[in-house]
């Protein structure tokens, strides 16, 4: 008996293969389009910014207008660098981290421990709202609280507080998500050994989730590194290297804005942007590495 | 007095009228009274959801970690109420081993065994620690297998080795009672056999309460057995007697595979 052929043997397999190839091609083209902006940005920054990068760029403060003008006239590279911005950015990021990390870790652990409870849900929603607050508004708030209220003048502390508020929601959510990933059996193992609650959190849970916590912290730092608006309203900027948190301080993004407003220093805009971008990218790559190594 | 409940003299543990409810009127354990024999393996059997794990966790008060728990009744360890002790002290005397091996992932094998002391902040000399680690690992038969890698993390060990590591961690405190919540259900038959042999050896020094889903395991290694159903302790007897001649029809139904 002849079996009935359900599918035509002479089906249009060529057409099917062609469709397959067409689809694959489209996906590749679109994916390339998606990543092309980042490649173009890096290319542009390297071409325009690399010539300014030298030792002085990291070790000296920004030149004044006259120096820059003379250099541009003579066709030389602009002297000086962004040492005041780099040190200011590092100072403010460190202070902001000191404020934000302990608070956010505690809130994140609180949210994890109180899943489904009303108060925790309220805090979680407020955290989400905080994440949506425009950074310039946070700058205004830090201005009123710290610049007017505490340091009686523009200060690195005010900038740090604004950045810390921006970091809070990022670290809180990553802490909660990290804690949720740790198997509950690890916590039970601690409890079964009679270990008090605070020690289970400090010595068992936090070390077990270390890579996740670290990733969240690094990503939040790289997120605030490039913030400009809140710093304009709080630390103002400075032409010298400053480590006093009650005094006005410079920062790399602030300097980019200043260079941009000075027609003689356009070249420095590109080199500073290149530096900032490289710094943020490096932090992101480190964060990725940490989360991959420990997961 | 209920005829189906075994009487024991000089028990290590006495459970008296214990009821545990989650929320309103949902009893996970309903008025259970039983004594647990010293230096023996007592198995708790029953179908899923019968309250055997809850009963086990009530013995070292681990069930208090869950919200909305109401506990009534009394449990006595060597005659002293467990509610008069701090949980820290109680859990040193009543250790626990879980369904899945759960060594601390950030600690080395050595640190895992001594974790109970270290995490509670006791200041032991290095030599005292070494001694505890060595004797605990010897007791679970793991020392020869891991003596060259004591400072490595425990995650390269097999499931069975990890479970023995967890038992060693519990033994480090020299507890009176060890609670085991289906300790072999995540293990292969060979590792299971090793753990079962170990339990039989351990009962010379410790009293073991073993929750198990596996009837043949209870038959193989336990001295006494409890059968729980819907939160109730239906029958408690010497294992041999229960398996050959159950008194309650529900026990007989479970043991012959009619439900469960």
Image: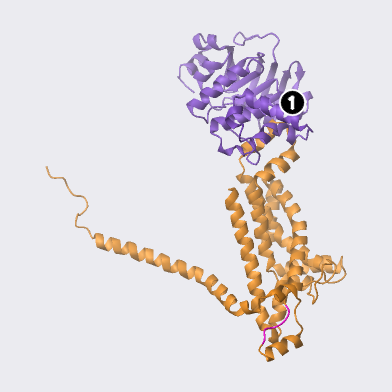
Q: Which residues are magenta?
A: A76-80
Q: Is residue A110 magenta?
A: no
Is B106 in front, or is B221?
B106
Is A269 in front, or is A129?
A269
- The quadrant of the picture occupied by the N terminus of chain B is top right
Is B115 in front, or is B128?
B128
Q: How is the image coloured?
A: by chain
| Chain A image colour | orange
Report the number of discs: 1
Is there any visible trace of residue A50 in the rendered image?
Answer: yes
Q: Quadrant of residue B167?
A: top right
Q: Position of residue A47 (x, y in %)?
A: 57, 78
The residue sitting at 75% across, 35% down in the picture is A196
Q: Position of residue A210 (x, y in %)?
A: 66, 48
| Chain B image colour | purple
Q: Position of residue A263 (x, y in %)?
A: 69, 87
Is A30 on the left-hand or right-hand side of B24? left
Is A126 in front, or is A292?
A292
Q: Position of residue B250 (x, y in %)?
A: 51, 16
Q: Quadrant of residue B22?
A: top right
The residue sitting at 85% across, 69% down in the picture is A148
Magenta span: predominant SS is loop
Relative vertical location of residue B5 with respect to residue B118 in this rendering, above or below: above
Q: Furthest residue to the front?
A: B148
Reading the image, the residue beneath label 1 is: B90
Is there any visible trace of residue B45 in the rendered image?
Answer: no
């Amino acid at each position: 008996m002849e079996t009935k052929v359900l599918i035509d043997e002479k089906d249009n397999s060529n057409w099917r293969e062609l469709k397959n190839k067409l689809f694959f091609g489209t996906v590749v083209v679109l994916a390339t389009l998606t990543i092309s902006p980042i490649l173009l940005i890096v290319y542009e920054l390297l071409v325009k910014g690399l010539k300014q990068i030298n030792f002085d760029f990291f070790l000296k403060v920004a030149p004044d207008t006259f120096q820059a003008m003379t250099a541009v006239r003579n066709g030389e590279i602009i002297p000086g660098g962004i040492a005041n911005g780099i040190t200011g950015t590092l100072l403010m990021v460190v202070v902001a981290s000191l404020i934000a990390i302990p608070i956010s870790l505690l809130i994140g652990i609180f949210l994890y421990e109180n899943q489904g409870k009303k108060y925790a849900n309220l805090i979680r929603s407020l955290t989400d709202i905080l994440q949506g607050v425009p950074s310039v508004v946070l700058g205004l708030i830090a201005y009123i609280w710290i610049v007017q209220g505490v340091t009686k003048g523009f200060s690195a502390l005010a900038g740090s507080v604004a950045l810390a508020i921006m970091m809070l929601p990022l670290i809180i959510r990553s802490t909660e998500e990290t804690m949720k990933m740790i198997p509950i059996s690890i916590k039970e193992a601690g409890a079964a050994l009679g270990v008090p609650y605070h020690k289970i959190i400090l010595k068992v849970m936090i070390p077990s989730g270390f890579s996740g916590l670290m990733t969240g912290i690094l990503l939040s730092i790289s997120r605030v590194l490039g913030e400009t608006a809140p710093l304009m309203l709080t630390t103002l900027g400075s032409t010298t290297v400053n480590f006093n948190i009650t005094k006005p301080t410079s920062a790399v993004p602030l300097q980019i804005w200043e260079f941009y407003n000075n027609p003689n220093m356009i070249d420095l805009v590109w080199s500073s942007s290149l530096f900032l971008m490289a710094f943020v990218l490096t932090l992101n790559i480190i964060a990725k590495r940490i989360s991959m190594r420990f997961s | 007095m209920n005829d189906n409940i075994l009487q024991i003299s000089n028990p290590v543990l006495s459970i008296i009228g214990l009821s545990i409810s989650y929320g309103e009127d949902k009893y996970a354990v309903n008025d259970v009274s039983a004594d647990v024999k010293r230096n023996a393996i007592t198995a708790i059997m029953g179908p899923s959801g019968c309250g055997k794990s809850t009963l086990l966790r009530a013995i070292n008060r681990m069930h208090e970690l869950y919200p909305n728990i109401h506990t009534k009744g009394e449990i006595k360890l060597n005659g002293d109420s467990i509610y008069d002790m701090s949980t820290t002290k109680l859990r040193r005397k009543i250790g626990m081993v879980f369904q899945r091996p759960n060594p601390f992932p950030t600690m080395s094998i050595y640190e895992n065994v001594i974790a109970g002391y270290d995490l509670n902040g006791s200041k032991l000399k290095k030599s005292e620690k070494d001694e505890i680690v060595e004797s605990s690992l010897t007791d679970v038969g793991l020392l020869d297998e891991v003596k060259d890698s004591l400072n490595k993390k425990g995650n390269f060990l097999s499931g069975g080795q990890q479970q023995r590591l967890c038992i060693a961690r519990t033994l480090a405190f020299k507890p009176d009672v060890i609670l085991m919540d289906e300790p072999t259900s995540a293990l292969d038959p060979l590792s299971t056999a090793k753990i079962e042999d170990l339990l039989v050896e351990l009962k010379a020094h410790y009293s073991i309460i073993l929750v198990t889903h596996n009837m043949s395991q209870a038959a193989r290694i336990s001295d006494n057995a409890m059968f729980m159903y819907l939160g109730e302790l239906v029958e408690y007897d010497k294992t041999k007697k229960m398996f050959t001649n159950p008194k309650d029809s529900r026990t007989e139904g479970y043991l012959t595979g009619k439900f469960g």
